[in-house]
Amino acid sequence: MDEQQRRLAEELIFSGEKKSSFAKKLYFGLLDSDQLFPYPKENSAEKNKVDEFLSKVDNFIQKEIDPAAIDRIASIPDHVIKGLGELGVLGMTIPKEYGGLGMSQYAYCRVVEAISRRCGSTALFVNAHQSIGLKALLLFGTEAQRKRWLPNLARGEALAAFSLTEPNAGSDASGVETRAVFIPEKNVYRINGKKQWTTNGSIAQVLTVMAQTEVETPQGKQDKITAFLVNPDMPGFTITAHALDKVGMRGSKTANLEFKNLEVPAENILGPLGGGLKVCLTVLDFGRTTFGAACTGAAKALVEKATLHAVNRWQFKRPLASFGLVKKKIATMSALAYAMDATTYMTAGLVDSKADDFMLEAAMLKVFTSDSLWSILYDAMQILGGRSFFTDEPYERMMRDARLNMIGEGSNEVMRAFIGVVGMRDVGMQLKNVMEALQNPFLKHEVLLQFIRQRWNCLKSPKIPVHSSLLTSETDKLGKAIRQFGNAILRLLGKHRENILEKQLLLDRIASSAMAIYTCASVLSKLDSDLAEARGNSAALGNDVPIAKLYCQMAFDCIDTNLGSLFSNHDQTFEVVSDQITGVKFP
Protein backbone atom coordinates (compact mmCIF):
# COMPACT_ATOMS: atom_id res chain seq x y z
CA MET A 1 0.00 0.00 0.00
CA ASP A 2 1.61 3.29 -1.08
CA GLU A 3 1.46 6.54 0.91
CA GLN A 4 -1.39 7.99 -1.18
CA GLN A 5 -3.53 4.89 -0.67
CA ARG A 6 -2.73 4.94 3.04
CA ARG A 7 -3.83 8.56 3.42
CA LEU A 8 -7.01 7.82 1.49
CA ALA A 9 -7.83 4.86 3.74
CA GLU A 10 -7.28 6.97 6.84
CA GLU A 11 -9.55 9.71 5.47
CA LEU A 12 -12.34 7.33 4.53
CA ILE A 13 -12.39 4.60 7.14
CA PHE A 14 -11.14 6.31 10.25
CA SER A 15 -12.51 9.84 9.95
CA GLY A 16 -14.98 11.26 12.45
CA GLU A 17 -15.68 10.53 16.08
CA LYS A 18 -17.32 7.14 16.47
CA LYS A 19 -17.91 4.76 19.32
CA SER A 20 -15.55 1.86 18.77
CA SER A 21 -17.36 -1.22 17.52
CA PHE A 22 -17.52 -4.62 19.21
CA ALA A 23 -15.16 -6.06 16.60
CA LYS A 24 -12.54 -3.30 16.88
CA LYS A 25 -12.37 -3.67 20.66
CA LEU A 26 -11.61 -7.38 20.25
CA TYR A 27 -8.23 -6.41 18.81
CA PHE A 28 -7.35 -4.87 22.19
CA GLY A 29 -8.42 -8.09 23.93
CA LEU A 30 -11.53 -6.33 25.24
CA LEU A 31 -15.19 -7.39 25.24
CA ASP A 32 -17.89 -4.76 24.74
CA SER A 33 -20.70 -7.01 25.86
CA ASP A 34 -23.36 -4.30 25.72
CA GLN A 35 -23.26 -4.35 21.92
CA LEU A 36 -23.98 -8.09 21.61
CA PHE A 37 -25.84 -9.03 24.79
CA PRO A 38 -28.75 -9.52 25.07
CA TYR A 39 -29.41 -10.83 21.58
CA PRO A 40 -31.41 -8.41 19.38
CA LYS A 41 -34.97 -9.55 18.80
CA GLU A 42 -38.19 -8.03 17.55
CA ASN A 43 -40.75 -7.03 20.13
CA SER A 44 -44.03 -8.95 20.00
CA ALA A 45 -45.89 -6.27 18.02
CA GLU A 46 -43.11 -5.98 15.45
CA LYS A 47 -42.75 -9.76 15.23
CA ASN A 48 -46.46 -10.23 14.55
CA LYS A 49 -46.33 -7.54 11.86
CA VAL A 50 -43.29 -9.07 10.19
CA ASP A 51 -44.66 -12.64 10.46
CA GLU A 52 -47.86 -11.54 8.74
CA PHE A 53 -45.93 -9.79 5.98
CA LEU A 54 -43.56 -12.72 5.58
CA SER A 55 -46.52 -15.07 5.19
CA LYS A 56 -47.73 -13.00 2.22
CA VAL A 57 -44.24 -12.96 0.73
CA ASP A 58 -43.87 -16.74 1.15
CA ASN A 59 -47.21 -17.32 -0.55
CA PHE A 60 -46.16 -15.12 -3.46
CA ILE A 61 -42.75 -16.79 -3.73
CA GLN A 62 -44.19 -20.28 -3.92
CA LYS A 63 -46.88 -19.36 -6.46
CA GLU A 64 -45.09 -16.90 -8.72
CA ILE A 65 -41.34 -17.61 -8.63
CA ASP A 66 -40.07 -20.53 -10.70
CA PRO A 67 -36.31 -20.57 -10.02
CA ALA A 68 -35.49 -23.20 -12.66
CA ALA A 69 -37.33 -21.23 -15.35
CA ILE A 70 -35.68 -17.97 -14.27
CA ASP A 71 -32.28 -19.64 -14.56
CA ARG A 72 -33.15 -21.24 -17.90
CA ILE A 73 -34.42 -18.08 -19.61
CA ALA A 74 -31.89 -15.88 -17.75
CA SER A 75 -34.55 -13.37 -16.76
CA ILE A 76 -36.88 -12.56 -13.87
CA PRO A 77 -40.40 -12.18 -15.34
CA ASP A 78 -42.04 -8.76 -15.25
CA HIS A 79 -44.96 -10.09 -13.21
CA VAL A 80 -42.55 -11.18 -10.46
CA ILE A 81 -40.93 -7.74 -10.27
CA LYS A 82 -44.34 -6.07 -10.35
CA GLY A 83 -45.67 -8.40 -7.65
CA LEU A 84 -42.70 -7.75 -5.36
CA GLY A 85 -43.30 -4.03 -5.81
CA GLU A 86 -47.00 -4.30 -5.05
CA LEU A 87 -46.28 -6.36 -1.92
CA GLY A 88 -43.91 -3.67 -0.72
CA VAL A 89 -40.79 -5.85 -0.75
CA LEU A 90 -38.90 -3.37 -2.96
CA GLY A 91 -39.50 -0.56 -0.47
CA MET A 92 -39.34 -2.38 2.86
CA THR A 93 -36.61 -0.21 4.39
CA ILE A 94 -37.82 3.07 2.85
CA PRO A 95 -39.64 5.25 5.43
CA LYS A 96 -43.40 5.51 5.09
CA GLU A 97 -43.17 9.23 4.36
CA TYR A 98 -41.51 8.34 1.05
CA GLY A 99 -43.92 5.55 0.18
CA GLY A 100 -42.11 2.60 1.75
CA LEU A 101 -43.03 0.23 4.57
CA GLY A 102 -40.53 1.66 7.05
CA MET A 103 -39.51 -1.78 8.31
CA SER A 104 -36.31 -2.72 10.11
CA GLN A 105 -33.13 -4.24 8.71
CA TYR A 106 -33.96 -7.30 10.82
CA ALA A 107 -37.31 -7.69 9.02
CA TYR A 108 -35.74 -7.02 5.63
CA CYS A 109 -33.15 -9.75 6.22
CA ARG A 110 -35.92 -12.21 7.09
CA VAL A 111 -37.61 -11.51 3.76
CA VAL A 112 -34.37 -11.76 1.75
CA GLU A 113 -33.63 -15.03 3.51
CA ALA A 114 -37.04 -16.38 2.47
CA ILE A 115 -36.54 -15.31 -1.15
CA SER A 116 -33.05 -16.80 -1.33
CA ARG A 117 -34.34 -20.17 -0.16
CA ARG A 118 -36.40 -20.19 -3.35
CA CYS A 119 -34.31 -18.29 -5.92
CA GLY A 120 -30.83 -16.79 -5.73
CA SER A 121 -31.34 -14.57 -8.78
CA THR A 122 -34.45 -12.93 -7.32
CA ALA A 123 -32.73 -12.38 -3.97
CA LEU A 124 -29.80 -10.72 -5.76
CA PHE A 125 -32.17 -8.50 -7.74
CA VAL A 126 -33.87 -7.33 -4.55
CA ASN A 127 -30.51 -6.79 -2.83
CA ALA A 128 -29.10 -4.79 -5.75
CA HIS A 129 -32.21 -2.58 -5.86
CA GLN A 130 -32.73 -1.93 -2.17
CA SER A 131 -29.58 -2.78 -0.22
CA ILE A 132 -27.19 -0.80 -2.43
CA GLY A 133 -29.12 0.66 -5.38
CA LEU A 134 -31.32 3.09 -3.48
CA LYS A 135 -29.50 2.98 -0.13
CA ALA A 136 -27.14 5.85 -1.01
CA LEU A 137 -30.14 8.01 -1.91
CA LEU A 138 -31.84 7.07 1.36
CA LEU A 139 -28.77 7.75 3.50
CA PHE A 140 -27.11 10.68 1.73
CA GLY A 141 -29.80 12.24 -0.46
CA THR A 142 -31.27 15.68 0.10
CA GLU A 143 -34.94 15.98 1.01
CA ALA A 144 -35.69 17.08 -2.55
CA GLN A 145 -33.85 14.08 -4.00
CA ARG A 146 -35.65 11.66 -1.73
CA LYS A 147 -39.09 13.08 -2.50
CA ARG A 148 -38.35 12.97 -6.21
CA TRP A 149 -37.13 9.39 -6.55
CA LEU A 150 -37.94 7.24 -3.49
CA PRO A 151 -41.74 6.87 -3.89
CA ASN A 152 -41.45 5.23 -7.32
CA LEU A 153 -38.56 3.09 -6.13
CA ALA A 154 -40.55 1.97 -3.09
CA ARG A 155 -43.43 0.75 -5.27
CA GLY A 156 -41.18 -0.92 -7.82
CA GLU A 157 -42.41 1.45 -10.52
CA ALA A 158 -38.75 2.40 -10.89
CA LEU A 159 -35.70 0.25 -10.15
CA ALA A 160 -32.31 1.21 -8.76
CA ALA A 161 -28.72 0.19 -9.40
CA PHE A 162 -25.30 0.94 -7.94
CA SER A 163 -22.53 1.44 -10.51
CA LEU A 164 -18.96 1.37 -9.25
CA THR A 165 -16.91 -1.36 -10.96
CA GLU A 166 -14.89 -0.55 -14.06
CA PRO A 167 -12.42 -2.42 -16.29
CA ASN A 168 -9.55 -1.14 -14.10
CA ALA A 169 -11.36 -0.63 -10.78
CA GLY A 170 -12.97 -3.36 -8.72
CA SER A 171 -11.97 -4.09 -5.14
CA ASP A 172 -9.69 -1.04 -5.44
CA ALA A 173 -12.58 1.42 -5.50
CA SER A 174 -10.21 4.40 -5.44
CA GLY A 175 -9.01 3.41 -8.92
CA VAL A 176 -12.21 4.62 -10.62
CA GLU A 177 -11.35 6.26 -13.97
CA THR A 178 -14.77 7.59 -14.98
CA ARG A 179 -14.47 11.37 -14.79
CA ALA A 180 -16.99 14.15 -14.16
CA VAL A 181 -16.00 17.69 -15.22
CA PHE A 182 -17.98 20.70 -14.00
CA ILE A 183 -19.42 22.95 -16.73
CA PRO A 184 -20.26 26.18 -14.83
CA GLU A 185 -22.26 27.88 -17.59
CA LYS A 186 -24.70 24.93 -17.60
CA ASN A 187 -24.34 24.01 -13.90
CA VAL A 188 -23.84 20.38 -14.93
CA TYR A 189 -21.15 17.75 -14.65
CA ARG A 190 -20.08 16.13 -17.91
CA ILE A 191 -19.32 12.48 -17.31
CA ASN A 192 -17.19 10.22 -19.50
CA GLY A 193 -16.21 6.65 -18.75
CA LYS A 194 -17.17 3.00 -18.69
CA LYS A 195 -18.78 0.82 -16.02
CA GLN A 196 -19.01 -2.95 -15.98
CA TRP A 197 -20.93 -5.65 -14.15
CA THR A 198 -23.67 -3.34 -12.84
CA THR A 199 -26.49 -5.51 -11.47
CA ASN A 200 -29.87 -4.09 -12.61
CA GLY A 201 -27.88 -1.66 -14.79
CA SER A 202 -29.97 -2.22 -17.91
CA ILE A 203 -33.37 -2.10 -16.18
CA ALA A 204 -32.80 0.63 -13.59
CA GLN A 205 -34.30 4.09 -13.85
CA VAL A 206 -32.09 5.52 -11.07
CA LEU A 207 -28.39 4.70 -10.85
CA THR A 208 -25.82 5.77 -8.27
CA VAL A 209 -22.66 6.31 -10.33
CA MET A 210 -19.15 6.95 -8.99
CA ALA A 211 -16.86 9.32 -10.88
CA GLN A 212 -13.64 11.25 -10.27
CA THR A 213 -14.06 15.00 -9.80
CA GLU A 214 -11.61 17.82 -9.20
CA VAL A 215 -12.11 19.18 -5.69
CA GLU A 216 -10.58 22.13 -3.85
CA THR A 217 -8.84 20.99 -0.65
CA PRO A 218 -6.51 22.67 1.86
CA GLN A 219 -3.68 20.98 -0.06
CA GLY A 220 -4.90 22.38 -3.38
CA LYS A 221 -6.92 20.81 -6.18
CA GLN A 222 -7.22 17.03 -5.92
CA ASP A 223 -9.15 14.27 -7.67
CA LYS A 224 -11.77 12.72 -5.43
CA ILE A 225 -14.67 10.41 -6.15
CA THR A 226 -18.19 11.85 -6.15
CA ALA A 227 -21.52 9.99 -6.26
CA PHE A 228 -24.05 11.09 -8.89
CA LEU A 229 -27.70 10.18 -9.45
CA VAL A 230 -28.02 9.26 -13.12
CA ASN A 231 -31.03 8.39 -15.28
CA PRO A 232 -30.78 6.24 -18.43
CA ASP A 233 -32.78 8.77 -20.47
CA MET A 234 -29.97 11.32 -20.16
CA PRO A 235 -28.22 11.85 -23.54
CA GLY A 236 -24.88 10.06 -23.58
CA PHE A 237 -26.03 7.11 -21.45
CA THR A 238 -25.36 3.88 -23.36
CA ILE A 239 -25.94 0.27 -22.38
CA THR A 240 -23.17 -1.68 -24.13
CA ALA A 241 -24.26 -5.05 -22.75
CA HIS A 242 -27.82 -5.51 -21.45
CA ALA A 243 -27.43 -8.90 -19.78
CA LEU A 244 -24.03 -10.59 -19.69
CA ASP A 245 -23.99 -14.39 -19.68
CA LYS A 246 -22.93 -15.56 -16.24
CA VAL A 247 -22.04 -18.76 -14.40
CA GLY A 248 -24.88 -18.26 -11.93
CA MET A 249 -27.47 -15.75 -10.78
CA ARG A 250 -28.50 -15.87 -14.41
CA GLY A 251 -31.91 -14.31 -13.85
CA SER A 252 -30.38 -11.04 -12.66
CA LYS A 253 -29.43 -8.50 -15.31
CA THR A 254 -25.75 -7.63 -15.18
CA ALA A 255 -24.91 -4.81 -17.57
CA ASN A 256 -21.98 -2.89 -19.00
CA LEU A 257 -22.46 0.86 -19.37
CA GLU A 258 -20.71 3.72 -21.14
CA PHE A 259 -21.05 7.46 -20.62
CA LYS A 260 -20.13 9.83 -23.45
CA ASN A 261 -20.43 13.49 -22.50
CA LEU A 262 -23.31 12.59 -20.20
CA GLU A 263 -24.50 15.83 -18.62
CA VAL A 264 -25.78 15.44 -15.07
CA PRO A 265 -27.25 18.45 -13.22
CA ALA A 266 -25.21 19.59 -10.23
CA GLU A 267 -28.30 19.02 -8.08
CA ASN A 268 -27.87 15.29 -8.77
CA ILE A 269 -24.72 15.06 -6.68
CA LEU A 270 -25.37 12.56 -3.91
CA GLY A 271 -23.73 13.47 -0.65
CA PRO A 272 -20.83 15.94 -0.50
CA LEU A 273 -18.69 16.76 -3.52
CA GLY A 274 -15.68 14.48 -3.32
CA GLY A 275 -17.36 12.28 -0.71
CA GLY A 276 -18.26 9.42 -3.02
CA LEU A 277 -16.01 6.78 -1.52
CA LYS A 278 -17.56 7.31 1.91
CA VAL A 279 -20.97 6.93 0.27
CA CYS A 280 -19.73 3.77 -1.41
CA LEU A 281 -18.26 2.16 1.71
CA THR A 282 -21.31 3.00 3.81
CA VAL A 283 -23.70 1.51 1.27
CA LEU A 284 -21.64 -1.68 0.96
CA ASP A 285 -21.90 -2.22 4.73
CA PHE A 286 -25.67 -2.52 4.31
CA GLY A 287 -25.32 -4.70 1.22
CA ARG A 288 -22.99 -7.10 3.01
CA THR A 289 -25.48 -7.46 5.86
CA THR A 290 -28.16 -8.52 3.40
CA PHE A 291 -25.63 -10.81 1.70
CA GLY A 292 -25.55 -12.68 4.99
CA ALA A 293 -29.31 -13.17 4.94
CA ALA A 294 -29.26 -14.42 1.34
CA CYS A 295 -26.51 -16.95 2.08
CA THR A 296 -28.31 -18.07 5.23
CA GLY A 297 -31.55 -18.76 3.38
CA ALA A 298 -29.84 -20.96 0.79
CA ALA A 299 -27.83 -22.72 3.52
CA LYS A 300 -30.90 -23.62 5.56
CA ALA A 301 -32.63 -25.02 2.47
CA LEU A 302 -29.60 -27.18 1.67
CA VAL A 303 -29.29 -28.54 5.22
CA GLU A 304 -32.95 -29.53 5.20
CA LYS A 305 -32.72 -31.25 1.80
CA ALA A 306 -29.47 -33.07 2.55
CA THR A 307 -30.67 -34.26 5.96
CA LEU A 308 -33.95 -35.57 4.55
CA HIS A 309 -32.07 -37.45 1.83
CA ALA A 310 -29.58 -38.92 4.32
CA VAL A 311 -32.46 -40.28 6.40
CA ASN A 312 -34.45 -41.74 3.51
CA ARG A 313 -31.69 -42.96 1.21
CA TRP A 314 -30.52 -46.49 2.03
CA GLN A 315 -27.26 -48.06 0.90
CA PHE A 316 -25.69 -51.29 2.12
CA LYS A 317 -28.96 -52.04 3.94
CA ARG A 318 -28.78 -48.96 6.15
CA PRO A 319 -29.63 -45.26 5.83
CA LEU A 320 -26.90 -42.83 4.76
CA ALA A 321 -27.44 -40.96 8.01
CA SER A 322 -26.00 -43.92 9.92
CA PHE A 323 -22.50 -43.62 8.38
CA GLY A 324 -19.84 -41.73 10.30
CA LEU A 325 -18.64 -39.56 7.44
CA VAL A 326 -22.19 -38.52 6.60
CA LYS A 327 -22.93 -37.83 10.27
CA LYS A 328 -19.97 -35.44 10.41
CA LYS A 329 -21.20 -33.59 7.32
CA ILE A 330 -24.76 -33.20 8.63
CA ALA A 331 -23.55 -32.01 12.02
CA THR A 332 -21.07 -29.55 10.51
CA MET A 333 -23.59 -28.19 8.01
CA SER A 334 -26.17 -27.70 10.76
CA ALA A 335 -23.67 -25.94 13.02
CA LEU A 336 -22.56 -23.57 10.25
CA ALA A 337 -26.16 -22.75 9.29
CA TYR A 338 -27.00 -21.99 12.93
CA ALA A 339 -24.01 -19.65 13.21
CA MET A 340 -24.88 -17.97 9.90
CA ASP A 341 -28.38 -17.26 11.21
CA ALA A 342 -27.17 -16.02 14.60
CA THR A 343 -24.54 -13.71 13.07
CA THR A 344 -26.82 -12.36 10.34
CA TYR A 345 -29.47 -11.17 12.76
CA MET A 346 -26.88 -9.98 15.26
CA THR A 347 -25.45 -7.72 12.56
CA ALA A 348 -28.93 -6.63 11.47
CA GLY A 349 -29.57 -5.75 15.10
CA LEU A 350 -26.49 -3.53 15.11
CA VAL A 351 -27.88 -1.71 12.07
CA ASP A 352 -31.27 -1.24 13.70
CA SER A 353 -29.71 0.01 16.94
CA LYS A 354 -28.06 2.81 14.93
CA ALA A 355 -24.60 1.59 15.89
CA ASP A 356 -21.94 4.16 15.03
CA ASP A 357 -19.76 1.61 13.33
CA PHE A 358 -20.55 -1.88 12.05
CA MET A 359 -18.12 -1.92 9.15
CA LEU A 360 -16.00 -4.80 10.43
CA GLU A 361 -18.99 -6.81 11.59
CA ALA A 362 -20.62 -6.50 8.14
CA ALA A 363 -17.38 -7.52 6.43
CA MET A 364 -16.99 -10.51 8.73
CA LEU A 365 -20.58 -11.57 8.11
CA LYS A 366 -20.16 -11.40 4.35
CA VAL A 367 -16.99 -13.50 4.33
CA PHE A 368 -18.18 -16.01 6.92
CA THR A 369 -21.60 -16.67 5.40
CA SER A 370 -20.40 -16.89 1.79
CA ASP A 371 -17.56 -19.28 2.69
CA SER A 372 -19.88 -21.33 4.90
CA LEU A 373 -22.54 -21.61 2.21
CA TRP A 374 -19.91 -22.92 -0.23
CA SER A 375 -18.82 -25.52 2.31
CA ILE A 376 -22.44 -26.53 2.97
CA LEU A 377 -23.06 -26.84 -0.76
CA TYR A 378 -20.11 -29.17 -1.15
CA ASP A 379 -21.25 -31.44 1.66
CA ALA A 380 -24.88 -31.39 0.54
CA MET A 381 -23.91 -32.40 -2.99
CA GLN A 382 -21.70 -35.20 -1.64
CA ILE A 383 -24.59 -36.53 0.43
CA LEU A 384 -26.94 -36.31 -2.56
CA GLY A 385 -24.31 -37.99 -4.72
CA GLY A 386 -25.25 -38.46 -8.38
CA ARG A 387 -28.62 -36.77 -7.92
CA SER A 388 -26.89 -33.44 -7.28
CA PHE A 389 -25.13 -33.60 -10.64
CA PHE A 390 -28.21 -33.38 -12.81
CA THR A 391 -30.14 -30.27 -13.70
CA ASP A 392 -33.56 -31.63 -12.75
CA GLU A 393 -32.50 -30.98 -9.15
CA PRO A 394 -31.68 -27.49 -7.79
CA TYR A 395 -28.19 -28.22 -6.49
CA GLU A 396 -26.07 -27.41 -9.54
CA ARG A 397 -28.00 -24.15 -9.98
CA MET A 398 -27.52 -23.30 -6.33
CA MET A 399 -23.81 -24.08 -6.67
CA ARG A 400 -23.49 -21.75 -9.66
CA ASP A 401 -25.46 -19.04 -7.87
CA ALA A 402 -23.38 -19.31 -4.69
CA ARG A 403 -20.10 -18.72 -6.49
CA LEU A 404 -20.82 -15.00 -6.83
CA ASN A 405 -21.09 -14.51 -3.08
CA MET A 406 -17.35 -14.89 -2.55
CA ILE A 407 -16.59 -12.31 -5.25
CA GLY A 408 -19.36 -9.69 -5.15
CA GLU A 409 -19.19 -6.59 -2.94
CA GLY A 410 -15.50 -7.22 -2.23
CA SER A 411 -13.74 -10.52 -2.92
CA ASN A 412 -13.26 -12.58 0.22
CA GLU A 413 -9.46 -12.36 -0.05
CA VAL A 414 -9.60 -8.56 -0.13
CA MET A 415 -12.13 -8.56 2.71
CA ARG A 416 -9.93 -10.79 4.86
CA ALA A 417 -7.00 -8.42 4.48
CA PHE A 418 -9.39 -5.53 5.18
CA ILE A 419 -10.65 -7.18 8.39
CA GLY A 420 -7.09 -7.70 9.58
CA VAL A 421 -5.76 -4.23 8.74
CA VAL A 422 -8.76 -2.17 9.87
CA GLY A 423 -9.08 -4.13 13.09
CA MET A 424 -5.41 -3.68 14.03
CA ARG A 425 -5.19 -0.01 13.09
CA ASP A 426 -6.37 1.41 16.44
CA VAL A 427 -4.04 -0.90 18.36
CA GLY A 428 -1.17 0.20 16.14
CA MET A 429 -1.97 3.86 16.71
CA GLN A 430 -2.05 3.28 20.46
CA LEU A 431 1.37 1.60 20.38
CA LYS A 432 2.76 4.47 18.32
CA ASN A 433 1.48 6.97 20.89
CA VAL A 434 2.98 4.93 23.73
CA MET A 435 6.38 4.84 22.02
CA GLU A 436 6.27 8.61 21.58
CA ALA A 437 5.19 9.07 25.19
CA LEU A 438 8.17 7.03 26.38
CA GLN A 439 10.41 9.69 24.87
CA ASN A 440 8.87 12.26 27.23
CA PRO A 441 7.09 10.36 30.02
CA PHE A 442 6.61 13.34 32.32
CA LEU A 443 4.62 15.35 29.80
CA LYS A 444 2.70 12.37 28.40
CA HIS A 445 2.20 10.26 31.51
CA GLU A 446 -1.57 10.02 30.91
CA VAL A 447 -0.96 8.09 27.69
CA LEU A 448 1.25 5.63 29.53
CA LEU A 449 -1.14 5.27 32.45
CA GLN A 450 -4.08 4.58 30.14
CA PHE A 451 -2.07 1.90 28.33
CA ILE A 452 -0.98 0.30 31.60
CA ARG A 453 -4.57 0.27 32.93
CA GLN A 454 -5.83 -1.30 29.71
CA ARG A 455 -3.13 -3.98 29.70
CA TRP A 456 -3.85 -4.70 33.38
CA ASN A 457 -7.53 -5.24 32.54
CA CYS A 458 -6.49 -7.65 29.81
CA LEU A 459 -4.55 -9.89 32.19
CA LYS A 460 -7.84 -11.56 33.00
CA SER A 461 -10.17 -13.08 30.46
CA PRO A 462 -13.36 -11.03 30.01
CA LYS A 463 -16.58 -12.48 31.38
CA ILE A 464 -19.29 -13.30 28.85
CA PRO A 465 -22.64 -12.13 30.29
CA VAL A 466 -24.84 -15.16 29.72
CA HIS A 467 -27.37 -16.47 32.21
CA SER A 468 -27.64 -20.17 31.38
CA SER A 469 -25.33 -22.51 33.28
CA LEU A 470 -25.44 -24.79 30.24
CA LEU A 471 -23.06 -22.40 28.49
CA THR A 472 -20.42 -22.01 31.20
CA SER A 473 -17.75 -24.03 29.41
CA GLU A 474 -18.22 -22.18 26.12
CA THR A 475 -18.23 -18.72 27.70
CA ASP A 476 -15.06 -19.47 29.66
CA LYS A 477 -13.33 -20.58 26.46
CA LEU A 478 -14.56 -17.54 24.53
CA GLY A 479 -13.28 -15.16 27.21
CA LYS A 480 -9.89 -16.87 27.08
CA ALA A 481 -9.87 -16.68 23.28
CA ILE A 482 -10.53 -12.91 23.35
CA ARG A 483 -7.62 -12.38 25.75
CA GLN A 484 -5.31 -14.54 23.63
CA PHE A 485 -6.38 -12.71 20.49
CA GLY A 486 -5.58 -9.30 21.98
CA ASN A 487 -2.15 -10.50 23.16
CA ALA A 488 -1.41 -11.96 19.72
CA ILE A 489 -2.23 -8.63 18.05
CA LEU A 490 0.21 -6.78 20.33
CA ARG A 491 2.96 -9.29 19.67
CA LEU A 492 2.33 -9.27 15.93
CA LEU A 493 2.44 -5.48 15.67
CA GLY A 494 5.51 -5.34 17.88
CA LYS A 495 7.29 -7.66 15.48
CA HIS A 496 6.14 -6.34 12.10
CA ARG A 497 4.99 -2.75 12.78
CA GLU A 498 3.77 -1.09 9.55
CA ASN A 499 5.08 -4.00 7.47
CA ILE A 500 2.06 -5.96 8.68
CA LEU A 501 0.13 -4.28 5.84
CA GLU A 502 1.97 -6.52 3.37
CA LYS A 503 1.75 -9.74 5.43
CA GLN A 504 -1.49 -10.99 3.93
CA LEU A 505 -1.10 -14.58 5.11
CA LEU A 506 -0.87 -13.31 8.68
CA LEU A 507 -3.79 -10.94 8.11
CA ASP A 508 -5.81 -13.92 6.89
CA ARG A 509 -5.18 -15.75 10.19
CA ILE A 510 -6.14 -12.66 12.17
CA ALA A 511 -9.34 -12.29 10.15
CA SER A 512 -10.25 -15.96 10.61
CA SER A 513 -9.73 -15.67 14.36
CA ALA A 514 -11.74 -12.43 14.61
CA MET A 515 -14.61 -13.95 12.61
CA ALA A 516 -14.60 -17.05 14.81
CA ILE A 517 -14.86 -14.86 17.94
CA TYR A 518 -17.64 -12.67 16.52
CA THR A 519 -19.70 -15.61 15.22
CA CYS A 520 -19.20 -17.60 18.43
CA ALA A 521 -20.29 -14.63 20.54
CA SER A 522 -23.37 -14.24 18.33
CA VAL A 523 -24.21 -17.93 18.72
CA LEU A 524 -23.90 -17.80 22.51
CA SER A 525 -25.94 -14.60 22.73
CA LYS A 526 -28.74 -16.09 20.61
CA LEU A 527 -28.77 -19.42 22.43
CA ASP A 528 -28.74 -17.78 25.86
CA SER A 529 -31.66 -15.58 24.84
CA ASP A 530 -33.62 -18.55 23.50
CA LEU A 531 -32.95 -20.55 26.68
CA ALA A 532 -34.17 -17.64 28.77
CA GLU A 533 -37.42 -17.53 26.78
CA ALA A 534 -37.77 -21.29 27.26
CA ARG A 535 -37.17 -20.84 31.02
CA GLY A 536 -34.04 -22.97 30.79
CA ASN A 537 -35.83 -25.91 29.19
CA SER A 538 -33.27 -26.92 26.56
CA ALA A 539 -35.59 -29.64 25.22
CA ALA A 540 -37.97 -26.91 24.06
CA LEU A 541 -35.28 -25.73 21.63
CA GLY A 542 -35.04 -29.07 19.87
CA ASN A 543 -31.50 -29.70 18.65
CA ASP A 544 -30.34 -26.09 18.93
CA VAL A 545 -28.25 -26.57 22.08
CA PRO A 546 -25.97 -29.38 20.80
CA ILE A 547 -25.77 -27.72 17.35
CA ALA A 548 -24.74 -24.37 18.85
CA LYS A 549 -22.24 -25.99 21.19
CA LEU A 550 -20.70 -27.85 18.26
CA TYR A 551 -20.25 -24.59 16.38
CA CYS A 552 -18.54 -23.03 19.38
CA GLN A 553 -16.06 -25.91 19.47
CA MET A 554 -15.44 -25.47 15.74
CA ALA A 555 -14.78 -21.76 16.35
CA PHE A 556 -12.35 -22.47 19.20
CA ASP A 557 -10.46 -24.96 17.02
CA CYS A 558 -10.26 -22.30 14.29
CA ILE A 559 -8.89 -19.73 16.75
CA ASP A 560 -6.32 -22.15 18.19
CA THR A 561 -5.11 -23.15 14.73
CA ASN A 562 -4.80 -19.62 13.40
CA LEU A 563 -3.27 -17.97 16.47
CA GLY A 564 -0.96 -20.95 16.91
CA SER A 565 0.49 -20.50 13.41
CA LEU A 566 1.03 -16.72 13.54
CA PHE A 567 4.67 -17.06 14.56
CA SER A 568 5.51 -20.55 13.33
CA ASN A 569 4.46 -21.25 9.75
CA HIS A 570 5.61 -21.92 6.20
CA ASP A 571 4.45 -18.62 4.71
CA GLN A 572 7.84 -17.72 3.26
CA THR A 573 8.00 -21.04 1.41
CA PHE A 574 4.65 -20.36 -0.27
CA GLU A 575 5.81 -16.92 -1.35
CA VAL A 576 9.21 -18.10 -2.64
CA VAL A 577 7.66 -20.92 -4.67
CA SER A 578 5.01 -18.59 -6.11
CA ASP A 579 7.64 -15.98 -7.05
CA GLN A 580 9.64 -18.66 -8.83
CA ILE A 581 6.59 -19.90 -10.74
CA THR A 582 5.28 -16.49 -11.77
CA GLY A 583 8.48 -14.51 -11.98
CA VAL A 584 6.64 -11.75 -10.10
CA LYS A 585 8.00 -10.28 -6.91
CA PHE A 586 6.50 -6.98 -5.73
CA PRO A 587 8.08 -4.94 -4.41
Image (spheres, helix red, strand yellow):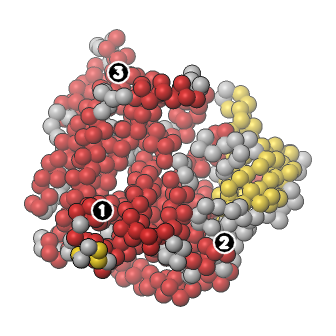
Residue 303 percent across, percent down from the top left: 35, 70
Quadrant in the rendering for residue 421 = top left
Say which mark, if any, is on residue 495.
Answer: 3
Quadrant for the N terminus, please.
Answer: top right
Say which mark, if any, is on residue 74.
Answer: 2
Side (left or right) of 345 relative to 399: left
Q: Residues within 10 Å of mark 1 (few under 14, many from 20)?
A: many
Q: Residues within 10 Å of mark 2 (few under 14, many from 20)?
A: many
Side (left or right) of 183 relative to 53: right
Q: In this view of the protein, which residue sits in the foreground, 197 or 428? A: 197
The amino acid type of the residue labelled 3 equals Lys
Q: Is residue 294 above or below residue 52?
A: above
- The mark nearer the N terminus, 3 or 1, is 1
Q: In this view of the protein, which residue sits in the foreground, 572 or 426? A: 572
Q: Residue at x 17, y 69 (%)?
A: 532
Say which mark, if any, is on residue 302.
Answer: none
CB atoms of marks 3 and 1 within 8 Å: no
Say which mark, if any, is on residue 329.
Answer: 1
Residue 491 percent across, percent down from the top left: 29, 26
CB atoms of marks 2 and 1 within 8 Å: no
**SS assignment at label 2:** loop
The amino acid type of the residue labelled 1 equals Lys
- The mark nearer the N terminus, 2 or 3, is 2
State how far apart marks 3 and 1 are (Cα): 39 Å
- The mark nearer the N terminus, 2 or 1, is 2
State how far apart marks 2 and 1 are (Cα): 32 Å
Quadrant in the rendering for residue 267 = bottom right
CB atoms of marks 2 and 3 within 8 Å: no
